[in-house]
Image (cartoon, rainbow, N blue to C red):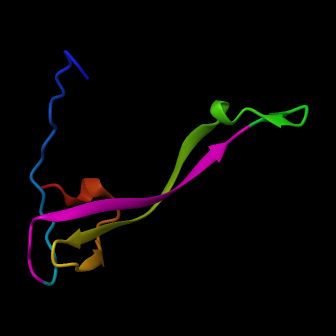
Amino acid sequence: MYGTTIEKDTRKSKAKCPKCKSIDIIIFEKSVHFQTWEQIDGYIDYNEGYMSPGDVIGTFGRCNCGHEWKFKSFQITGLFI
């Protein structure tokens, strides 16, 4: 990405590992999404599909020690201070 500046949108988080209390963690949101393709005359153009977002199943965390957990807050926006 030459000549492009990407501004970071950093926000303070209250998230931490419940076991070791580390604040250096990976946060991921698991969700359902739908991938859709249209078939015409028996052919599917694989490059013409589109994805639509679905419901969030949950927000999960993993620390450098290997602990994994599910956050009580349902979506990532609930983790910001």
Q: Where is residue 9 in the image (x, y as percent from the top left)?
A: 16, 38
Q: Which one is in front, 61 or 72? A: 61
Q: Which one is in front, 63 or 55? A: 63
Q: In which quarter of the image is residue 56?
A: bottom left
Q: Where is residue 44 in the image (x, y as percent from the top left)?
A: 78, 36
Which residue ends up furthest to the front in the rendered image? 2
Q: Which one is in front, 66 or 10? A: 66
- Image quarter of the N terminus: top left
| Membership of 34 in magenta stretch | yes
| Region in magenta | 20-37
Number of labels in the image equals 0
Q: Quadrant of residue 64?
A: bottom left
Residue 75 falls left or right of residue 43:
left
Q: Which residue shows up at 57% across the image and 41% down it?
A: 51
Residue 16 falls left or right of residue 40:
left
Residue 49 falls left or right of residue 57:
right
Which residue ends up furthest to the right in the rendered image? 41
Which residue ends up furthest to the top in the rendered image? 3
Q: Which residue shows up at 22% across the image and 78% down it?
A: 66
Residue 67 falls left or right of residue 32:
left
Q: Which residue shows up at 33% across the image and 59% down it?
A: 75
| Membership of 46 in magenta stretch | no
- Image quarter of the C terminus: bottom left
Q: Quadrant of residue 68?
A: bottom left
Q: Where is residue 67 in the image (x, y as percent from the top left)?
A: 23, 80
| Secondary structure mostly taken by the magenta-highlighted segment of the chain | strand
As drawn, 37 above or below 67: above
